[in-house]
Image (spheres, rainbow, N blue to C red):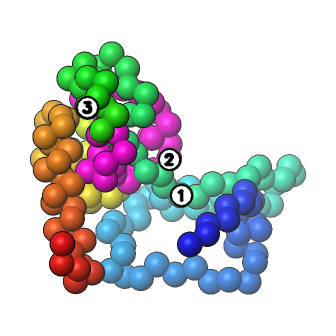
Amino acid sequence: MNFNTTSQTFRQLMGNGLSYRVPRFQRDYSWDVDHWDDLWLDIVGLFGDEPEPAHYMGYSIEHVLPESPGDDWQQFDEQQREASTYRLGNMTLLDSNPNRRLGNTGFTERRRAYLESEFAITRKLAEEFDAWTVDKIGSRQGWMAKQASSIWQVNF
């Protein structure tokens, strides 16, 4: 599968003749006033005096144990870090803005942001784990594999 990414303005994205639809079963949250305000500001921005810079609407993969961990990650030695960073159990979904703000902070600060996430899977991580270790990554990865196999009817 090949993904070609490009930066587009909101006008280019919405004025391309395509329809965008998210199936009901994939909507794990409801919009509140802040979401509608953001959308309205995006639409109003289309008609301003200056053209809008590239507009990114999306989410990113968050590494719970960061790719370049700081001092708050002493519980992982170098070998554990290399073996754990890119495991599926160490990844979750997060809006791009909090992801950038978190940087290489420790789990305590990350957990607070995860509790506020619009993604149920990310909130679940924060609710179930009060610390982040190699064993917790393995446990979460096992749970994720069971979820995937029940959804896609795959036997592991």
In space, the residues marked 3 and 1 are separated at their CA atoms by: 31 Å
Q: Does residue 147 appear in the picture of this structure?
A: yes
Quarter placement of the C terminus: bottom left
Between disc 2 and disc 3, whose residue precedes? 3
Whether tag 2 and tag 1 are in contact, CB under 8 A, the answer is yes
Front residue of this view, candidates 47 and 106: 106
User: Percent from the top left, x then y, of residue 102?
Assistant: 42, 32
Determine the image quadrant of residue 33: bottom left
Residues in magenta? 84-110
What residue is disc 1 on? Answer: 58
**How far apart are the alpha carbons under marks 2 and 1?**
7 Å
- Give the amino acid type for the residue marked by disc 1 in the picture: Gly
Q: Is residue 117 visible?
A: no
Mark 1 neighbour class, 10 Å CA radius: few under 14, some 14 to 19, many 20 or more: few
Provide the residue designation for mark 3: 80
Where's residue 49, x and y in %?
87, 51
Which residue lies at the image location 33% right of the left edge and 58% below the top edge?
Answer: 119
